[in-house]
Amino acid sequence: MLKHLTEIWKKPKENLGDVWKNRLIKLRTEGTVVRVDKPTRPDRAKRLGYKAKQGFVVVRAKVPKGTRKRPKVAGGRRPKTAGRFFPPDKSKQQMAEEKASRKYPNMEVLNSYYLTEDGRHKWYEIILADTSHPAVKKDKERKWVASGKHKGRANRGLTSSAKKSRREK
């Protein structure tokens, strides 16, 4: 079944039709960081480390598109040096992970994946693990997150999306 879901998500606009339109409308009305009961893309979430048990949470985060705009300086200055649009040194996905980790400080970011975008925003779903939950501590494959040295992964640029944006360009 997960294989078929992967195929559908390759071209969601064509494959999902009106369901896709309605979902986008719903996403626009939601807040910036929203907890989700189940992942929207279970195939992708499972591949990135999500498990449907206690201690694991999926969060949807919205990030504005475009570059960062700095306010215009007042007073007379040379126009050449008064640049106002600066691309941040990190990806939108990394920004979404940081927003989620700020909202849920007791949890650690495992990974995240792209969900959708419109003209103004991009949405990502972030997989979080509760580091103090016994189910996470007992899990053989995920217990590494509970150790202290992985604290603040999203803010230190240690998630997979952050590592990609730190690569040499």
Image (cartoon, rainbow, N blue to C red):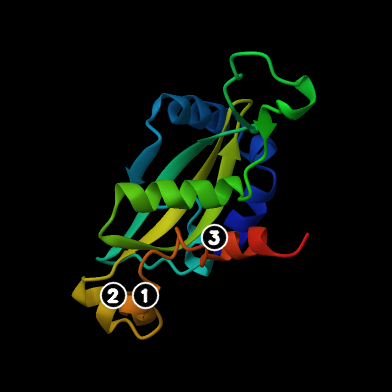
Say what amino acid the circle numbered 2 marks.
Answer: Val
Say whether residue 166 is left or right of residue 156: right
Mark 1: secondary structure: helix
Q: CA distance from mark 1 to mark 2?
A: 8 Å
User: CB atoms at circles 1 and 2 under 8 Å apart?
Assistant: yes
Q: Which residue is label 1 attached to? A: 145
Residue drawn at x 35%, y 69% as measured from the top left:
151
Query: What x and y, as percent, mark residue 66?
Result: 65, 32
Say what amino acid the circle numbered 3 marks.
Answer: Arg
Residue drawn at x 36%, y 75% as measured from the top left:
145
Say whether residue 19 is left or right of residue 110: right
Mark 3: secondary structure: helix
Alpha-carbon neighbours of circle 3 within 10 Å: few (<14), some, or many (≥20)? many
Query: What x and y, as percent, mark residue 113?
Result: 55, 54
Query: What x and y, as percent, mark residue 40?
Result: 46, 48
Q: Earlier in the sequence, mark 2 or mark 3?
A: 3
Q: Residue furthest front?
A: 76
- Which numbered disc, 2 or 3, marks the residue closer to the eye? 2
Q: CA distance from mark 3 to mark 1?
A: 20 Å
Mark 2: secondary structure: helix
Alpha-carbon neighbours of circle 2 within 10 Å: few (<14), some, or many (≥20)? many
- Disc on res. 44: 3
* Number of numbered tags placed on the structure image: 3
Alpha-carbon neighbours of circle 1 within 10 Å: few (<14), some, or many (≥20)? many
Residue drawn at x 28%, y 55% as measured from the top left:
105
- Residue 144, compared with residue 68, is above or below; it is below
Q: Which residue is label 2 attached to? A: 136
